[in-house]
Amino acid sequence: MVAGAVVRDAGDGRAELLLAQRAYPPEVAGRWELPGGKAADGETLAEALVRELREELEVSVLPGEPLEQRVLLREELTLVALWARLLGGTPRAVEHHALTWVDAEALTAMADRDELVPADTAWIPELLAALRAP
Ligand code: 523
């Protein structure tokens, strides 16, 4: 299972992260996540991320290094996040309720309000460090 930490330069030197609001299942609908999905047989995590974000967001991305935290979702299902950059397209919420770009302050506020998908909270320290890096 792979998710993408898609970051962009907001233009003024600040970095922003793309979050997607889940539409299903009911337990997590309305909460925000790093978008992604399950790798198919024979697919690398990077290949799966490229495919999933093309399907879910209609963008092409360049996958990079994995984030350090790996999240055990359930037995034999580990969630790995890869840093990624947009190569082309404007993200569109094909399967999600909505999409948003957040800076460190907005991500902190969402985390404080408990608006993230539970598994994804494992990445908050790493995400904030990257968003705050000069
Ligand atoms: N998560 C999760 N965080 C996160 C993702 C992308 C997924 O906790 N950033 C969990 C939520 C679901 C499970 O992983 O319980 C499957 O995610 P999903 O539905 O995005 O993956 P799909 O689309 O590959 O899986 P199916 O809906 O089962 O086909």
Image (tube, rainbow, N blue to C red):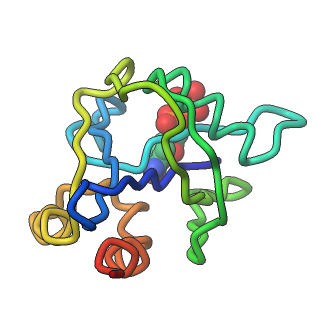
Return the residue nearer the eye: 94 or 64.
64
Please identify the quarter of the rendering in which residue 29 is found. Answer: top left
Please identify the quarter of the rendering in which residue 75 is found. Answer: bottom right
Name the spot of residue 45 as percent of width and height, x first: 73, 48
Give the vertical position of 20 relative to 93 (above or below): below
Horizontal placement of 111 versus 121: left or right? left
Q: Residue at x 38, y 21 (%)?
A: 95
Which residue is at the far front?
12
Name the spot of residue 14 as percent of width and height, x first: 25, 66
Horizontal placement of 9 versus 48: left or right? left
Q: Quadrant of the C terminus?
A: bottom left
Name the spot of residue 28 as percent of width and height, x first: 30, 43
Horizontal placement of 98 versus 123: left or right? left
Q: How many numbered discs?
A: 0
Name the spot of residue 127 as percent of width and height, x first: 38, 71
Q: Residue at x 72, y 38 (%)?
A: 39
Q: Residue at x 34, y 30 (%)?
A: 24
Give the vertical position of 111 relative to 62 (above or below): below
Q: Residue at x 22, y 70 (%)?
A: 104
Which residue is at the far right?
42
